[in-house]
Image (tube, rainbow, N blue to C red):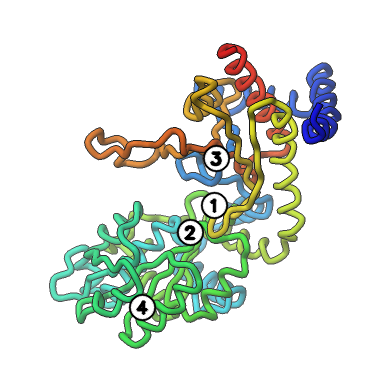
Amino acid sequence: MERRTFIKWATALPLLAQVEFQRAIGTGWAQTAKVSTDNIYTRIGIKPVINGRGTWTYLSATLELPEVKAAQEAASQHFVNIFDLQHAVGRRLAELTGAQSGMITSGAAGAMASATAGCIAGTDPERVWQLPDTTGLKHEVVMMGGRSPFDSAIRLAGGKLVIAKSVDELANAITDNTAMVYTTSDPDTLVKEIAVTKRANVPIFMDAADGVPPIDKLQLFAKMGCDLFTVSGGKGLCGPQSSGVLLGRKDLIEAALANSNPWEGAVCRPMKVGKEEIMGCLAAVEAWYHKDLSALDKEWNGRVERIQKLIQTMQGVTTSIDTPPGGNSYPTLTVSWDQDAWGYTIADCARELLDGTPSIAVLTNDNPSDVLGRAPDRRKVKNIKNNNLQIISMTLKPGEEIIVGRRLRQLLSEAKSKKA
């Protein structure tokens, strides 16, 4: 036996023995698997998912922190004036982040819409009532880098998209009709974009929906001078799924509030966020300032390491663990094999994992929630050979990694046996 193979088996055998012991006596991961087949969702005829794909909205994105659940339960016990509540929360968010003010929205896309409406109409009641008709109003929104899958949130508030593919194009894209600049750029590029927008006296909106953790990103954007910026409440923040945080200049936050719920007649009135979501999202922000991110990274890494141990002893299977830069920065396991030689594709494996019981979602190059993917004439052709099967650690619950690893090992073993 090669030395490398011996080491893999030496590290895997204790875990394999533990897994089989738990299976025999029905504890640990075996008990977790049983719970996943009898719960509030199975009783109405649908299967919940073991989520190894990450914080995707169509998979309900995240699980709430205990602090969030407690805050929502407490908030549900009282009536409160939503106008007063948003202003109070804005003051607290300012204390936490260094931004001038803030508000809770119906997700990061809700923040996009409210911010756009605020930058176009301000707080003038007549202009608020006029939207999404923008006649006579500045209404162009410069999109840095190109269109976004979420830019309908900008257009529904009355924004007209103008594309700037680079910082060099930004100055010429800004006109007397520009209401806002939208960006998702990395900090180095963002600094250059802010310099341009400051000279033009046009607000810039930074969409960092999946940028938390780390929570200090919020302070970073405030220090950099972002006029407006947002993170999703229902992704890495682990707040309510239907929430988001919008932060920035006080005058622009007031304008966004003027165009949002609970104002009747405001274009963003339908994007309602309740007292439970508001207090739950605030609780999530507060909670992250007390989290030990290094300890969480160690825990998340341990989950994908255990999956790796369960499958890495299989001949022809290669694995690696890394933490992608940018958003969704969680320890991620990548699994690959010779799809042609095995006659078994990444897509085949992902489908069988999802169709099984319990249902397991993993990350591949597909996007089941992509509206363009539903249109045959616009569907992008995927290169299967360049596809990867990845497992995101953060959205796995404790014990679920054993279920995933065991099932993945089973499917790969069956596929290889058939080909042999």
User: Badge 3, how many Cα within 10 Å: few under 14, some, many 20+?
Assistant: many
Which mark is in front, 3 or 2? 3
Q: Decide: marks 3, 1 in contact (CB < 8 A)?
A: no
Which mark is in front, 3 or 4? 3
Q: Badge 3 is on which residue?
A: 53
**Which label's residue is closer to the chain start, 3 or 1?**
3
Of all residues, the one furthest to the front in this rendering is 2
Rounded to the nearest whole Å, what is the CA distance between mark 4 and mark 2?
18 Å
Numbered badge on residue 235: 1
Under mark 2, the amino acid is Ala
Looking at the picture, how far across and down is residue 95, in whole percent?
A: 60, 77
Rounded to the nearest whole Å, what is the CA distance between mark 3 and mark 2?
17 Å
Looking at the picture, how far across and down is residue 406, in whole percent?
A: 69, 25
Can I make out residue 157 in this image?
Answer: yes
Numbered badge on residue 209: 2
Q: Decide: marks 4, 1 in contact (CB < 8 A)?
A: no
